[in-house]
Amino acid sequence: MKLFLDTADVAVIRDMVPTGMVDGVTTNPSLIAKSGRNIAEVIAEICALVEGPISAEAVSLDFETMVKEGDKLAAIAPNVVVKLPLTWDGLRACRVFADKGIKTNVTLCFSAAQALLAAKAGATFVSPFVGRLEDNGADGIGLLEEIRVLYDVHGFDTQILAASLRNVNHVAAAAVAGSDAATFGADTFKALVNHPLTDKGLDAFVADWAKTGQSIL
């Protein structure tokens, strides 16, 4: 499963890239607003740091303007993925971009029926929102499993990009559910490596090694 950072903070991305684990980046209007910077500049900087797919979202709600915005975003760099909402206008725009060979990420997916429409529209990625579903008492991981079955049965190429992941357990569950990719914040990204038994084991190894009085170097 590919691991994407969900952020528009270039400093955070720069800090995480040396791990070798950042396969892509997703942004949205809220993250761009939080950065306080021009969207084109931010996306260009991110694309220069990460070779993988970088999602940049169209902000208009009507089909014609979405296409214009998407064209402008896609022109920033070859690895830009145009992010579109799961609405009829968004799906129409998705089909236009698919026909042009421009990659898309259809976002705000909350049902298998919506995921079906995104795949039929030619979406490169569909982003089911796990955490937000669970906030409303629904089974977010279960939705990922449903979409996986749906796509496999019908041979759709659209990749499942698990989004709105709040913790390490969400990330692991998304991988088990068969997601092609998952996106989450830097705090969760860093926490993936942590386990108390790993720390305990390392402490024991270090203590035992010190008793030998040896040095490998």
Image (cartoon, helix red, strand yellow):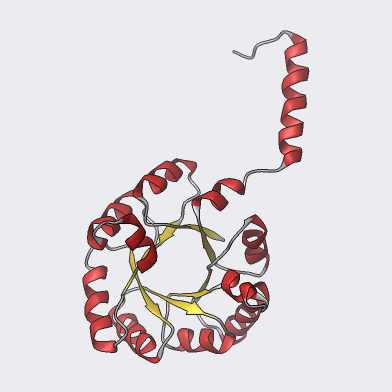
Q: Is residue 28 visible to us here?
A: no
Quadrant containing the N terminus is: bottom right
Name the residue at 72% across, 29% down: 202
Report the front residue among 152 and 46.
46
Q: Is residue 204 visible to us here?
A: yes
Name the residue at 62% across, 85% down: 153
Farthest top residue?
213
Quadrant containing the C terminus is: top right
Give the tally of numbered discs: 0
Q: Position of residue 83 (x, y in %)?
A: 37, 73
Q: Position of residue 33 (x, y in %)?
A: 33, 62
Residue 39 figure quarter: bottom left
**Location of residue 95 with respect to 192 vertically, above or below:** below
Q: Position of residue 118 (x, y in %)?
A: 46, 84
Q: Position of residue 190 (x, y in %)?
A: 56, 46
Name the residue at 49% across, 42% down: 19
Q: Is residue 102 left or right of residue 141?
A: left
